[in-house]
């Protein structure tokens, strides 16, 4: 009996999910060392990324996007604002609300961090064969697809 017949489809999917989870954690830990050089904490970088790509956003929506409570997000935004990465402005649709928007400095920091992470990944990918690189590309496409489907 072959291994594929002994392993149920559900178990095979779970095994791949477990391996992918482990690989993703190792990759994120490796890339976090690149972010350390920026001097911005991972939670702040994550929040900054949302602000950069979502455009001006309210604190509540930003907190929901990051999966944290509004008071926690307020503290993160306070730090980003102190560092000159974001600014608050009145929400034109809510007299009591504010929107958080990125500054040019915040956009540059996020762009520089992404470039550093991409260079670090490219260094590792450069040692792969063209077939392996094609497999990684296909895997990345599939990961993107399942990530968007679950969102």
Image (cartoon, helix red, strand yellow):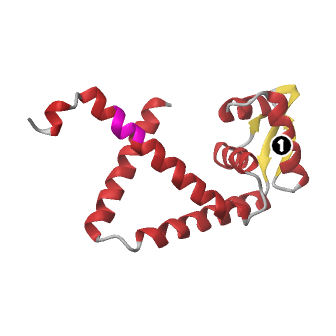
- 25 to the left or right of 33: left
Left or right of 66 in this view: 84: right
Compared with residue 148, is residue 22 higher up or lower down, i.e. above or below? below
At 76% from the left and 52% from the top, the residue drawn is: 41
- Judging by the rendered image, the residue that carries numbered circle 1 is 77
Residue 83: image location, x then y, percent? 87, 56
Q: Residue at x 81, y 55 (%)?
A: 85
Residue 14 pos. (x, y %): 35, 32
Residue 51: x and y, percent? Answer: 71, 45
Query: Residue at the spot x=61%, y=67% of the render?
Result: 116
* Vertical side of 17 occupied by 135: above or below: below
Q: Which region of the structure is painted magenta?
A: 14-18
Pick whichever, 30 or 3, lies toward us: 3
Q: Taken as a whole, is the magenta stretch helix, strand or loop?
A: helix
* Residue lying at 68% horizontally and 60% vertically, measured from the top left: 35
Asked if 34 appears above or below 10 in the picture, the reply is below
Q: Please count the marks in the image.
A: 1
Determine the image quadrant of residue 63.
top right
Residue 71 image point, x, y percent:
85, 30
Question: In what element is the residue under mark 1?
Answer: helix
83 versus 121 height, above or below: above
Foreground of the two, 115 or 35: 35
């Amino acid at each position: 009996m072959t291994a594929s017949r002994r392993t149920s489809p559900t178990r095979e999917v779970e095994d791949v999910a477990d391996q992918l989870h482990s690989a993703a954690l190792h990759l994120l830990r490796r890339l976090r060392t690149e972010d350390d050089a920026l001097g911005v904490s991972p939670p702040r970088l994550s929040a900054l990324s949302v602000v950069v790509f979502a455009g001006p956003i309210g604190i509540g929506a930003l907190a929901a996007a990051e999966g944290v409570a509004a008071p926690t997000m307020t503290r993160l935004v306070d730090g980003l604002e102190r560092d000159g990465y974001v600014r608050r402005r009145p929400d034109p649709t809510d007299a009591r609300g504010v929107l958080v928007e990125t500054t040019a400095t915040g956009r540059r920091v996020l762009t520089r961090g992404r470039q550093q992470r991409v260079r670090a990944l490219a260094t590792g990918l450069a040692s792969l064969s063209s077939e392996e690189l094609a497999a990684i590309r296909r895997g990345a496409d599939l990961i993107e697809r399942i990530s968007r489907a679950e969102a």
